[in-house]
Image: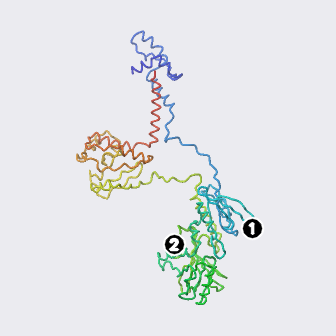
Amino acid sequence: MNFLRRRLSDSSFVANLPNGYMTDLQRPDSSTSSPASPAMERRAQPLAASFSSPGSSLFSSFSSAMKSTPPAPSGLMEPPAPPTPVVQRPRVLLVIDDAHTDWAKYFHGKRVNGEVEIRVEQAEFSELNLAAYVTGGCMVDMQVVRNGTKVVSRSFKPDFILVRQHAYSMALGEDYRSLVIGLQYGGLPSVNSLYSVYNFCSKPWVFSQLIKIFHSLGPEKFPLVEQTFFPNHKPMLTAPHFPVVVKLGHAHAGMGKIKVENQHDYQDITSVIAMAKTYATTEAFIDSKYDIRIQKIGSNYKAYMRTSISGNWKANTGSAMLEQVAMTERYKLWVDSCSEMFGGLDICAVKAVHSKDGRDYIIEVMDSSMPLIGEHVEEDRQLMADLVVFKMSQLLVPGGTVPSPLRPWAPPMKPAKSPGQAQLVPQLGQPQPRPPTQGGPRQAQSSQPPRSGSPSQQRLSPQGQQPVSPQSASPQQQRSPGSPQLARASGGSSPNQASKPALTSQPRPPIQGRSSSQQGEESQKSVPPHPHLNKSQSLTNSLSTSDTSQRGTPSEDEAKAETIRNLRKSFASLFSD
């Protein structure tokens, strides 16, 4: 206190202070000076008029320094102001379908994630052209012609595609597989996936997937029709039985299917296949009572029964009666099994035939280009639109709001043991529990029965140096670190445990916010503990455990350090000459 009095009574120190630094303490107080002599008393009176007391002046300096120091932030930086909402560009949806359906009205008012608008561009495969790049995506050129007049001609970059048209048909001479390849080359997501669309360009290829399901589920759960594949006409000598149905190449809507009654007709159709230069399939003719169609759009299921009225063996040709039937578990199994092929089909349908003898035969599966039937066509189109919006919200997250894969509060994963640890644990015979990470849930103990003082109940300290027993880290001892109970708990362990080296210490679990390189440096710098630890060292380790649990995040520590640095600067300016 005498030093502060001499220091504050120095005129040079007062002169170096900023203007008005201590004006709030200009109160006369004659009791501050020491009456050692009349000369010292006369010298101290002018200073007493300007300073009330050295102690209050020092506290005033502290308060001024604290006022000038900005408040410690809770993190590394102050939370930024809410950003100005940025208007996202509309997402372009390309619908590949004919002009009979206006898909724009089904997407009217719908938004991706409830924020981004959807702009619908609709055209057929024949009206599209494109150029795909590695980094530039896919640029589509659309030229829509109606009644010989060019209606629309523009280029755009689609963000999503809905395929509602067949990409390949040998009967119509349409082959747009190159466009599917270009869209896949540009990395565009679609419903169904472009990978599945390209695989559906060959019906025997799709039927091979049905054969896999048939062998997996069995003929009782998945009754697949018997079919034979011929790559060309040469092996088609005869059929095992008649009548048979011959299917040429890849076609849709009942085209390319012929019913053969006898061997002579079979030889005639074989010559036609030779001229077509394509593959063919034959399957036994089934005298059907009605056809069955089970469709799946997202999570919506419908089943229809179609009965021919005109008597044609093709139920989709001529007059037929269509009615919706109940969705059974058997039908649901069929369509769910088929929806898993080619990486997953969001939209698909299974066609089957119910014979007059009461048996069912699955004959075909269709993808997103399937025609819609029945009284719920508008509902099915709306379901498709909702499915597309849902897929776009999953894949096209706007504004970089993709959720981070890091989940700080997720249960910690068990690290893989190194060969050294795998050899060490069997030698010791008692596995050590994995220490919990900071802020994470505590792992369950081993299946061995708990024993007091056993190594299985010991817990590593945060420094990874000394196993600490559960009794030494109880909440009561953390509240009163200097109590006699803590000294007894730390000193009550057996001398054998205190003298044994910590051979079973495991690596320190990763702490959130630290990189793997920093953890590697810490593990290299760690020093093995001394085998002989006294009571004070055990007490220090116990206290460090509670101190680590009560310590804040690294951002709070940096904020406190910044405040201490500001105080040091204030002290330096206060006591400088």
Q: For the N terminus, give its image quadrant.
A: top left
The location of residue 177, given as percent across then percent down, is: 61, 68
The location of residue 478, given as percent across then percent down, is: 35, 43
Kindly give the residue lying farthest to the top in the view shown.
38
Q: Is residue 39 above or below residue 448?
A: above
Residue identified by numbered label 1: 146
Residue 337's disc number:
2
- Protein image colouring: rainbow
Q: Is residue 49 above or below residue 515?
A: above
35 displayed left or right of 331: left
Say whether disc 2 or disc 1 marks the residue closer to the N-terminus.
Answer: 1
Disc 2 residue type? Answer: Ser
Disc 1 residue type? Answer: Arg
Quarter-of-image position of residue 372: bottom right
The location of residue 135, given as percent across then percent down, is: 59, 55
The alpha-carbon separation of the residues under discs 2 and 1 comes to 41 Å
Kindly give the residue lying farthest to the left in the view shown.
495
The 10 Å Cα crowd at callout 1, few under 14, some 14 to 19, many 20 or more, is few
Q: Is residue 528 above or below residue 141?
A: above
